[in-house]
Amino acid sequence: MTERSPRLAAGLPDAGQGRRSLVITIDGPAGSGKSTTAQEVARRLGLLHLDSGALYRGITLALLRAFDGDLPVDRVDAARIGTLELEVAWDSEGPVIRLAGARVPDEDLRSDAVTAHVSAVAAVPAVRGWLLGAQRAGPRFPGLVADGRDMGTVVFPDADVKVFLEADTDVRALRRLRQRGVADPSPGEVRTEARKLEARDATDAGRELSPLRVPAGALVIDTSDLGFEEQITRILERVEAAG
Ligand code: CDP
């Protein structure tokens, strides 16, 4: 991995001197590579990383447990969320999700049950309201790279740099399967995964509140045929240009 750019690190606005911290948003559909990209941009620039999808997954997991796996989203409101013992704390890299005092492991957040329910939960106004506060209340110094669906449009509309990642559905499906350890997926497996991604995209883009959209002024990158390094370079160039 390339080292963090000294020029960028040195040029970061210093909140201690009363200047704003740098905020970079990376939005896009499921499996477009937002989180890995955001994590790497944050690492190179020495910034915090907010994976907002993990927060939506955390609240979905908490609700699945509270309702014993059978989740009626029409019964989810602010009062119910208040009973969940869900906490968003921050460590030096980003948010840590705790449920009943215990840190929730990543594999629980990314389980099939959570993935199957998360988009329906994310469309509930009380859920979005609760998480809007949790996302904005987090630390911003020395800066934040936030990834999700509405980072540049709703949560951080004044972000310094906005990015939107997209890729062909089959490419996203293949990446997802490989991420899960399926080294050589069959065409049928790719098709099934692609259908799941499309269903989630449709719910995320079709909901009334904070739908998945390209933010105005965003750098749009189609990563279907792009190497990871090239993608990171384009984003870092945009950050330098904005500085
Ligand atoms: O990693 P992947 O693209 O599969 O999804 P994620 O980023 O973990 O997000 C999971 C789900 O949370 C999405 O499908 C959305 O329904 C919801 N989400 C959202 O509504 N708004 C965000 N800012 C982030 C995630």
Image (tube, rainbow, N blue to C red):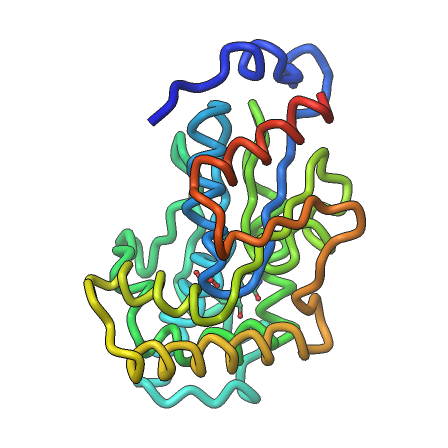
Quarter of the figure with the N terminus: top left
User: Which residue: 56% across, 23% down?
Assistant: 142
* x and y percentages locating residue 216 in the rendered image: 80, 51
Most distant residue in the front direction:
225
Q: Is residue 13 visible?
A: yes
Which residue ends up furthest to the right in the rendered image?
A: 216
Across and down, in percent, residue 106 comes to 29, 56
Quadrant of residue 179 in the image? bottom left
The mark total stands at 0
- Residue placed at 56% from the left, 11% from the top? 7
Side of 10 relative to 15 (left or right): left
Q: Which residue is nearer to you in this view: 129 or 122?
A: 122
Q: Horizontal placement of 117 versus 182: left or right? A: right
Give the residue drawn at x 51%, y 40%: 231
At x 40%, y 30%, the residue is 92
Whether residue 70 is situated above or below residue 145 in the rendered picture: below
Can I make out residue 66 in this image? no
The x and y percentages for residue 206 are 67, 79
Residue 123, compared with residue 166, is above or below; it is below
Q: Position of residue 98 (x, y in %)?
A: 34, 54
Among the 4 quarters of the image, the one containing residue 185: bottom left
Quadrant location of the C terminus? top right
